[in-house]
Every structure is written in structure tokens, then in C-alpha cells.
Amino acid sequence: MLSIIKKSGVLMGTRGRNSPDGGNRGRSVYQISVCTHLRKVTPQKERKKKSLSSPTPSPIMAIVLHSSPLLWTRLAAMVFACVAFSVAVHGGRLHHGTGDWCIFCWAFSFAGTLLVVLVELFGLQARAPVSWKNFPITFACYSALLCLSASIIFPLYFLKGSTGPSDVRDFRIVSTVFSCLATIAYISEVSISKARPGEVAGYMATAPGLLKVCETFVACIIFVFISDPVLYDRHDALKYCMSVYCICFILSAAIILLCIGECTGCLPFPFARFLSAYALLAVVLYLSATIIWPIFNFDPKHGGTKQRPYNCSNALGLCIWDKLIAVSVLTGLNFILYLIDLVYSTRLVFVSA
């Protein structure tokens, strides 16, 4: 910079002595030095503008891997469920609609657990459209119940009295074993994830939240037994029992969805009081259904049958009388679950997330 200014000054000085405007030499040198300075600084400003206007590179998504018993339990459950439905599809020769249900139970549990593991590995919990305090344990509880039902139904329909090839029977035994292992793994995940006494957690991680999952699942099993064939259209009292199952299922499912979607604060009334009132209502309704359903199905005065028909021994799976017994047992089970839910709901201090 200095060398350029000096050269400019010499040139101007020479021109000034030979020109009539020699008194303006200082101003001419100043002008030349400013122009030279601008020529040198302009490219730096342009580089700064380009660096500011150029798009910044997107951050690389990091994988966060924290080794914990919960992670290994999820991976084990995922592997067991994957092996169960893979072996059943490969060599089980499932020809009954019940086989499709078992495949759905294992595949649904595997896919959901894989989604949970990927979200936590990539640290996307905050971007998930659901409450991550409530969703993983809710899904794990449903997966445990699904795999448990598959572990009971699959051998009942595909191993009981099986006369097919030995290799097909071996494949079915392997699927049953891994289904039981997946059930144990999901139950372990729920046990690890559930809220401890004094711990602030989501509602679904507490005992009443897990009971809601069990209540809705038992109601779904009741719907399966009661609708194929239809077992509630013989009498108005049986239709009342069906309405009890539907009302309690809808309300319990709505509570679960509100907790997973973090919408409990949008209700015009306190959520904790609603839980207690609903648990009391459900106990009363299920108590009446527990009494009415057996009376109008097994009492001969109301067209019922006490003795198990002889053709039920040779039937594949469950006959109609067996399904009536199953609905009675499940109704009593749900009554007990709602009664425990009522006890917990009245004692639980719910802390909203």
C-alpha cells in the first residue's frame, strides 16, 4: 500500500511541476491513495459478502448410543419377535385366519420397537409428534399383551392335534418358543420403564396408565370372541353387556390417546377427577355385566346351557360354548382391573407433563 502511494505521489509531483495546477498536488495524491485503497479493500468485502450469502452446511445427525438394560431388552424383544414371525411365515404353513393374527402380533411388535430404537438412537424424541414419556411404555405394554395372546392362540390352533409333517411342526414349535421369549422381553421392558414411587413420570408409566392398556386389550379380546359368531343378539340383556364393553373401551382408549398426544390440558375439567369418576363408572358397569352375562348364557331358565356340548371336544380352537366361558372370564378380569384402577386413581397424585 505504501509503495503504491509513493509512486503515485512522484508521478503527480512531476505532472504538477509541469502543469499550471501545481498547487493541487496534495489533493491529487490523496485521491490516488484513496482509489488505490478502495481497489485493495473491495475484494475483501466481496469475499465477506459471499461467505455470508453462501448456504451453511447442514449439521450431521449424530447417533447417540447409550448402553443400558432398557436398550438391550428392546433389542432382545425385537429379535425374538422377528424370529417368531419369520419362522412361521417360512415353514409354518399357516392356513387359518388365526395365523394371520399371530403374524400381525409379532410383526407389529417388531416394527414398533424398531421405530422406538431408531428414534432414541438419532435423538429425535423432541421432534416426535407424541409424548415420549408415554408412548414407548404404552407400546411395550401392548406388544407384551399381543405376544402373550399369540403365544396362547398359536399353539392352540396350530400345535394342538397337529398331524402334518414333522418339519412343519418343528417350525411352529420354534415360533411358539420365540413368541414366549418376546413376551418375557416386553414384560421386562415395561418393568424397567414404569414409574417408581415418588418419581415424576408420564401417566402411562404409572399403574393406572398400564391398567388402561390392559383394560382396552381385554376388551378387544372380548370383541373377537363375542362377534365371531355373534353371541349377544339373543336377548336385550346381552346387548346391554355389549354396550358396556363398547363404552368402557372407547373411554379408556380416549384417555390413552389424550395422554400420548399430551392433550390432557385441553379438557374443560380436571383430568385427575375425570379419571376417578370414570373408574367408578366402569366398575359399576362391569359389575353388572359380570352378573348378567353368565345368567343369560348358562342358566337354562333364560335359554342357556350348563353342560359343555360333546362336539366341542373335536372342534378346532374354541367352540361357541367355550367362547361364552371365555367372555365371562374376561368380563370378570376386566372388572377386577377397573376395581384396582379405581383404588389407584383415588390415591394417585397425577403430575402433568
Image (cartoon, rainbow, N blue to C red):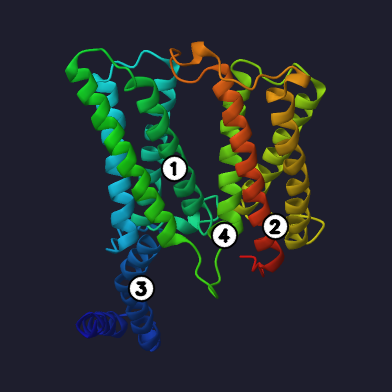
Q: How many marks?
A: 4
SS assignment at label 4? helix
Closer mark to the observer between disc 2 and disc 4: 2
Give the Cα distance between marks 1 and 2. 24 Å
Mark 2 surroundings: few (<14), some (14-19) or many (≥20) residues within 10 A: many
Are circles 2 and 4 on residues that touch, CB within 8 Å? Answer: no
SS assignment at label 2? helix
Of the residues shown, which amino acid type is indicated by label 1? Ser
Of the residues shown, which amino acid type is indicated by label 2? Leu
Give the Cα distance between marks 2 and 3. 82 Å
Reading the chain from its start, which is encountered first: label 2 or label 4?
A: 4
Give the Cα distance between marks 4 and 3. 75 Å
Q: Position of residue 54 (x, y in %)?
A: 37, 57
Reading the chain from its start, which is encountered first: label 1 or label 2?
A: 1
The C terminus appears in which quarter of the rendering?
A: bottom right
Mark 1 surroundings: few (<14), some (14-19) or many (≥20) residues within 10 A: many
| Image mark for residue 207 | 4
Q: Position of residue 6 (x, y in %)?
A: 23, 85
Residue of label 2: 342
Tell me if 151 is positioned left or right of 285 in this view.
left
Tell which of 105 and 129 is nearer to you: 105
